[in-house]
Amino acid sequence: MKNIRVIDGYEFEEYTRETFCEEEVLKRSREFHQWMNTRRTVRNFSDRPIPKEVIDNIILTASTAPSGAHKQPWTFCVVSNTELKKKIREAAEAEEYESYNGRMSDEWLEDLKQFQTDWHKPFIEVAPYVIIVFKKAYELDKDGNKKNNYYVNESVGLAVGFLLAAIHHAGLVALTHTPSPMNFLTKILERPANERPCFLIPVGYPTDDTYVPKLSRKPLKDIVVFYK
Ligand code: IYR
């Protein structure tokens, strides 16, 4: 049982955690980087099923992310139904077709060449689960009054980061897909007016013969500035 202290009328619980010696802290930080550095975005999904509880667990992990005023301004829509996945694929491909054939700049298309992407999105149908993440611009209380959320984009970005880490930790793969525009997802999934789609993330196993673009990550010196 955690100790409770009341401060200005609000309950605070004692913050308890596992503690590690410095050597262990070093080892854990090094090993976690090595593990996370093996995460890759994958576009070739197998249709091999995954237990529903895995999806529950990764979404609960995503929802441990910090959020503005702890509002947790997100809804994770989970789609495994074949018909619904087909409908989403068709709508996504229609938008992506337009994007690849006129809406995206030449520079953008050039930047994407190394990933060999195009408007075909078969993974939406093949992956056993597709998670569509919605941000909640505001909430409605029981009387229908608007209640503000804060730093919604940042909060949802953090939650998706946690989600991707959880998927990798479980030994599965994901693709962070952002068809544009995405409002077709509001319609198909019948989401309320306070929700906006942000990410479409197929989750599953990769196919046996999966190749990913050979890329390198920026070295520390290019991403960090230490101040004395
Ligand atoms: N939404 C398109 C295009 C695309 C854009 C970026 I930025 C990427 O990193 C990858 C793809 C698509 O999903 O194909």
Image (cartoon, rainbow, N blue to C red):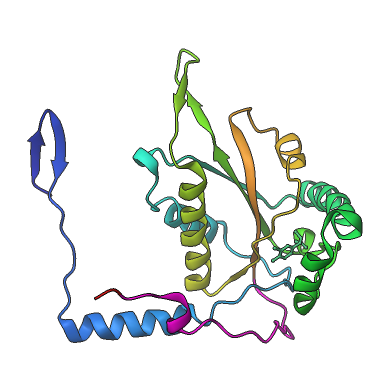
Instruction: Identify the residue shown where x is 79% and y is 59%.
Output: 125
- Residue at the right extreme of this rendering: 101
* In the foreground, 187 or 116: 116
- Residue at the front extreme of this rendering: 228
List x then y, in percent, for residue 101.
Answer: 91, 58
Instruction: Identify the residue shown where x is 69% and y is 59%.
Output: 177
Instruction: Identify the residue shown where x is 15% and y is 58%.
Output: 16
Determine whether 36 is above or below 108 in the image.
Answer: below
Determine whether 227 is above or below 67 in the image.
Answer: below
| Magenta: main secondary structure | loop
Badge count: 0
Indicate yes or no whether the magenta region holds residue 216: yes
The residue stretch that appears in magenta: 205-226
On screen, residue 20 versus residue 134, left or right, reads: left
Q: Where is residue 217, by image quadrant?
A: bottom right
Is the C terminus in the top left, top right, bottom left or bottom right quadrant? bottom left
List x then y, in percent, for residue 112.
Answer: 76, 71
